[in-house]
Image (tube, helix red, strand yellow):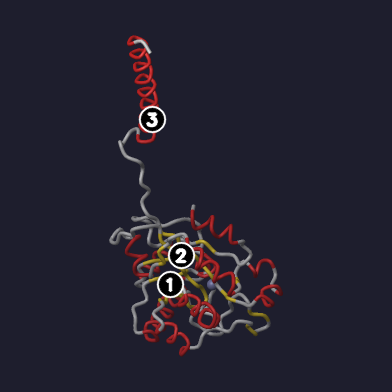
Amino acid sequence: MPHVAKSLLFLVLIAAGLHVDANRSGSSSLQHRGTGQATVMAPKLLCLMYHRFVDQAAFERLSKEQQAYAITPGRFDDHLRILKAAGRNVVALSDAIAFAKGERDLKRDSVLITIDDGCESALTIAAPLLKKHDMTATLFVTTDPNAYVFGCESGRCSDPRMSRKQLQAWCEMGFDVGSHGVTHRPLNLLSDSELMAELIESKRNLESLTGREIKALAVPRGKLDNRVQRTARGSGYEAVLTSERGKVEPGADLLGLARWNVSGRWSNTKFRSVITH
Ligand SMILES: [Zn+2]
């Protein structure tokens, strides 16, 4: 090849290379425009809410509405496996509160598992599965064992409430406890004195039973207003959990922490989408 032709070919190759590099750097700068770095999302906390654990045959006998507040052991096992596979950190109640207050950093997106009402199935079905996956959970207990909770008909409950001994066994397994009132009545409909009695009596009862300070309240049926929040704070609660969907970030309103009710009717795909978005 003549010398001039060789030089021309060399120049064409260099120009082509520069063009490729220019395109690469162009697309890269678009990704990082503004900060000079890729955006890093701060970790968030997702609070999940379960209620009762029932076998498949019992689950199929429930109405669709009741199935939204019950789950089979197999499906709950799936959820814990999915949380682990997604790299979610399952935290204790004290860590969740400290994170919401901005006092504790969570290295990655995390989950607080909560179970409302205090039915026996939390101890007999959920606890062994939580242990199997090395995860923790917080039980929100309605302290009057005769209080009406979902799943009771004509005074008989398909899933009885835990006895004091069973609640102590739950605590000895290293799990947390919070208050879910005394009678499971909607707190926003009670008189001032009834409301105060529900919040103080359930707190004292659980503290004497567990020997631990009870710092959190989950409001029965998600019924929350400003008066309930003020009374909870005045009664010594640090945090109040609702049934409003959302995620918790540092600086969140401690007297209205969002939670997702996990329905037993959800597919695993639906559960995966809730915990990853
Ligand atoms: Zn409840």
Left or right: 50 as drawn, with respect to 179: right
- In front: mark 2 or mark 3? 3
Q: Nearer the viewer, residue 100 or 73?
A: 73
Tell me which numbered mark, 1 or 2, is placed earlier along the sequence: 2
User: Looking at the image, do the residues carrying marks 1 and 2 touch, with CB atoms under 8 Å apart?
Assistant: yes
Q: Which mark is residue 135?
A: 1
Amino acid on which disc 3 is placed = Arg
Is residue 112 among the parts visible in the rendering? Answer: yes
At horizontal 33% and vertical 13% (from top left) the residue drawn is 7
Task: Mark 1 and ligand 1: say if the CB distance to the nearest ligand atom is below 8 Å.
Answer: no
Q: Which mark is residue 84?
A: 2
Left or right: 197 as drawn, with respect to 147: left
Image coordinates for residue 239, horizontal then vertical, percent? 38, 66
Q: Spatial distance from mark 1 to mark 3, Cα to Cα?
A: 45 Å
SS at badge 2: helix
SS at badge 1: loop
Residue 85 versus residue 160 in the image, above or below? above
Q: Nearer the viewer, residue 213 or 249?
A: 249
Amino acid on which disc 1 is placed = Met
Amino acid on which disc 2 is placed = Lys
Image coordinates for residue 253, horizontal then vertical, percent? 38, 58
User: Looking at the image, do the residues carrying marks 1 and 3 touch, with CB atoms under 8 Å apart?
Assistant: no
Task: Mark 2 and ligand 1: say if the CB distance to the nearest ligand atom is below 8 Å.
Answer: no
At horizontal 39% and vertical 21% (from top left) the residue drawn is 16
Left or right: 149 as drawn, with respect to 100: right
Label 3 belongs to which residue?
24
Q: Spatial distance from mark 2 to mark 3, Cα to Cα?
A: 37 Å
Tell me which numbered mark, 1 or 3, is placed earlier along the sequence: 3
